[in-house]
Image (tube, rainbow, N blue to C red):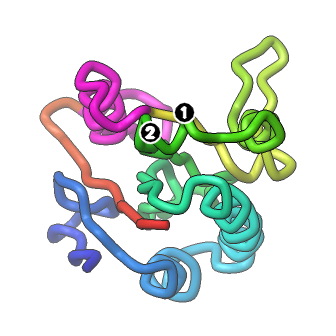
Amino acid sequence: MIPDFADGTWYLPHGIHTAQLDEVEGRFVTTAPFPSERRDVFDAFLLWHRIVSGILPTARFWLDGGFVTHKPWAAPSDVDVTVMARPDELNNLSVAEQTELERQFTVIGPPRVQPMSGKVDAFLCVRGDVDRTLYWREHWATVLDENRAKVADASKGFVEVRA
């Protein structure tokens, strides 16, 4: 369940908050600022999620970025996602599945290339890789202000959707 924002904030309380896709849509599209821009991002995410879930049926999707906030100054241009995948599932992919999966993730440039016409900023993390998991937990907890500066002494949460 996605908790309410703390009083006076526009971001989730610290932690991982598990939700279903319909709850994400209701909270971060339907009732959020800039709903039409968010609808485009969410629709791209839904298609992307369906593709990745078809390849990695037990994956967990950590959603973050401006999409999972209600920041008042700008619409989100994309949704940031870390796909938490089981190593055995990755190891059992066919060559065709590996090729398709590779196309679903952000390529750090230059030029930087994001899937779904830039509407999804996606990264892969192997479940059980403690260092990378901690990196993503800390990275997604960072609060940035309207000038993209880190907000001192602030920490936000993010949303986990299971395939």
Taking the spot 29% from the left edge, 69% from the top edge, the residue there is 18
- Amino acid identity at mark 1: Asn
Residue ID at (55%, 47%):
80
Point out residue 83 in the picture as x, y percentages from the top left corner: 49, 45
Q: Which residue is mark 1?
A: 91
Q: Is residue 35 above or below residue 17?
A: below
Residue 146 position within the rendered picture, expressed as x and y whole percent measured from the top left: 48, 42
Residue 128, picture quadrant: top left
Secondary structure of the residue carrying tag 1 is: helix
Q: Position of residue 150 (x, y in %)?
A: 33, 29
On the rendered structure, is 145 left or right of 99? left
For the residues bearing labels 2 and 1, Cβ distance under 8 angstroms: yes
Extent of the magenta region: 126-151
46 is higher (above) or lower (below) than 11: below
Which quadrant is the N terminus positioned in?
bottom left
Residue located at (70% from left, 76% from top): 39
Closer to us: 33 or 93: 93
Position of residue 47 relative to residue 77, above or below, is below
- Percent x, y of residue 142: 31, 36
Q: Which quadrant holds residue 141?
A: top left
What amino acid type should be assigned to the residue bearing mark 2? Asp
For label 1, the crowd category at 10 Å Cα-Cα, with few meaning under 14, some 14 to 19 and many 20 or more, is few
Residue 88 numbered tag: 2
Q: Residue at x 42, y 66 (%)?
A: 161
Query: Which element carries disc 2, helix, strand or loop?
Result: helix
